[in-house]
DNA sequence: GTCTATACTTCGATAGAC
DNA sequence: GTCTATCGAAGTATAGAC
């Protein structure tokens, strides 16, 4: 019960989050992380063994926190559509509390999982898993139309992450007068994604009425494959 | 009329695309680019002056090609919804022809535009500009509901880019048996994004019938602000 | 335009005292 | 657990001959 507690590792992780988010794995400098954490560089190696070890520890921490929050939403007792609303808001909230998350996530996606061991990959995989569970459940309850859960996962998570990670470059473009910052607030964007997903997932209760001119016969299609799968629009 | 033509710069750019996409700016090695292009390293510096100069030249080439294709679609004489379908298919096609594009785009977003000069930023900005033009036009023609064009841009481009950039890590997760590769083909994903955007943008012609239980009075809202702007779902 | 050789710098990591 | 000093590898860039 109380030692001064391991404050060093936590400070190092916090500093590493900023450095890796801002510069990427290769661009990150161990010296800068140590300086930012007000810790000696040798201390950093004492705790995390190597730059790679520190990176993996950071990613495990981030992704386990994120997936934990999403799993709680998935397990809650709410209608599927509301779970999706909450999942979107939850991701946005997580990003607000961990501003470095989007950049790190995008960089790791682009990196293709290099630098990651199996354990870290597993914690990463828990994020799409939790969201897919909500969607699959909604489909089986006929609350959602049959979509590919992973596809729906990408259409809700990717915009949030790219939008937030893109804040610095949008600011840069605004100061260079190359684009209007255009009053797209984070909150408004969250609502946009929520509305988009509501519409994207909504089961068509009544027979198709308007909105798609071409559609020959009635609902005599195949089983699970959504209408999406069958139609090719401009290949 | 014919000199052997400047094949070296083109080969260098092609090699640089692979290297920068796979490793990022900081992780890219000039030696590797030169070797892959079968060109002497001094030759590379002769043509592009520096690693940064090469990077900027590459990004200008990529983004001007992409925005050119999107501008052509925006200028075409088609209904707005079909333009969006074509824009989505066009981005997917561009990615198929430039497999390195998603990783480079995500990395540059995360990087916040470091390494980029004003001219390169301007070519980058042309991409959202072209897509936003289609959406704004559709809104003014009442073909789309009033959404923020930039928000809609993110919800259609980000999933495509993240999905494709994420292919390596999905493969890694599949071989580690951490997630099912689950038969989400690139074509199916394009159709999913098309369908999502159709539904997200569709103007509600008839008075809201079902699909939203809560909704008091009729359509006496403000002017441009869509319904999205006013409602907050789980803040 | 093309190549070899190399100058200069930076970074990850550790040795070893306290 | 903490610090100083430093090694060795690797990287960008250039000088200068052809």
Image (cartoon, coloured by chain):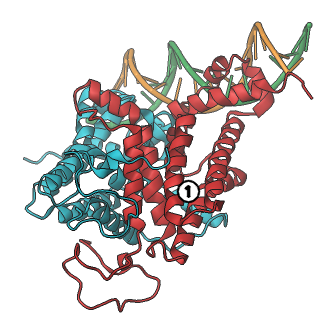
Chain colours: A red, B cyan, C green, D orange
Q: Is residue B26 left or right of residue B90?
A: right
Q: Is residue B202 left or right of residue D14?
A: left
Q: Which quadrant of the structure image shows residue A13?
A: top right
Q: Position of residue B232 (x, y in %)?
A: 42, 46
Q: Position of residue A77 (x, y in %)?
A: 63, 62
Q: Position of residue D18 (x, y in %)?
A: 33, 28
B220 versus C10 height, above or below? below
A187 versus B182 height, above or below? above
Residue that numbered label 1 is attached to: B169
**Viewer-closest of B211 and B70:** B211
What SS does tag 1 mark?
Answer: helix
Q: Position of residue B235 (x, y in %)?
A: 49, 43
Q: Is residue A77 left or right of residue B62?
A: right
**Viewer-closest of A84 and B5:** A84
Q: Residue visible at 47% across and 71% down?
A: A148
Residue A229 in view, yes or no = yes
Q: Residue visible at 25% across and 45% down?
A: B225
Q: Residues within 10 Å of mark 1 (few under 14, many from 20)?
A: some
């Amino acid at each position: 019960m109380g030692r001064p507690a391991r404050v060093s590792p936590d400070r190092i992780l916090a500093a590493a989050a900023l450095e890796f988010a801002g510069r990427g794995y290769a661009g990150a400098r161990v010296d800068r992380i140590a300086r930012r954490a007000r810790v000696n560089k040798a201390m950093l190696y004492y705790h995390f063994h190597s730059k790679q070890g520190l990176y993996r520890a950071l990613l495990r921490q981030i992704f386990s926190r994120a997936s934990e929050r999403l799993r709680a939403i998935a397990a809650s007792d709410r209608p599927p559509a509301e779970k999706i609303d909450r999942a979107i808001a939850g991701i946005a909230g997580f990003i607000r509390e961990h501003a470095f998350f989007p950049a790190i996530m995008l960089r790791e996606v682009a990196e293709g999982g290099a630098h990651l061991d199996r354990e870290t990959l597993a914690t990463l995989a828990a994020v799409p898993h939790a969201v897919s569970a909500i969607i699959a459940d909604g489909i089986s309850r006929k609350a959602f139309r049959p979509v590919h859960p992973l596809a729906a996962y990408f259409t809700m998570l990717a915009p949030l992450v790219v939008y937030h990670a893109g804040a610095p470059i949008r600011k840069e473009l605004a100061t260079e007068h190359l684009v209007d910052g255009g009053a797209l607030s984070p909150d408004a964007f969250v609502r946009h994604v929520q509305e988009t997903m509501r519409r994207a997932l909504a089961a068509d209760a009544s027979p198709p009425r308007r909105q798609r001119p071409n559609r020959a016969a009635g609902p005599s299609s195949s089983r699970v494959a959504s209408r999406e799968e069958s139609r090719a629009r401009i290949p």
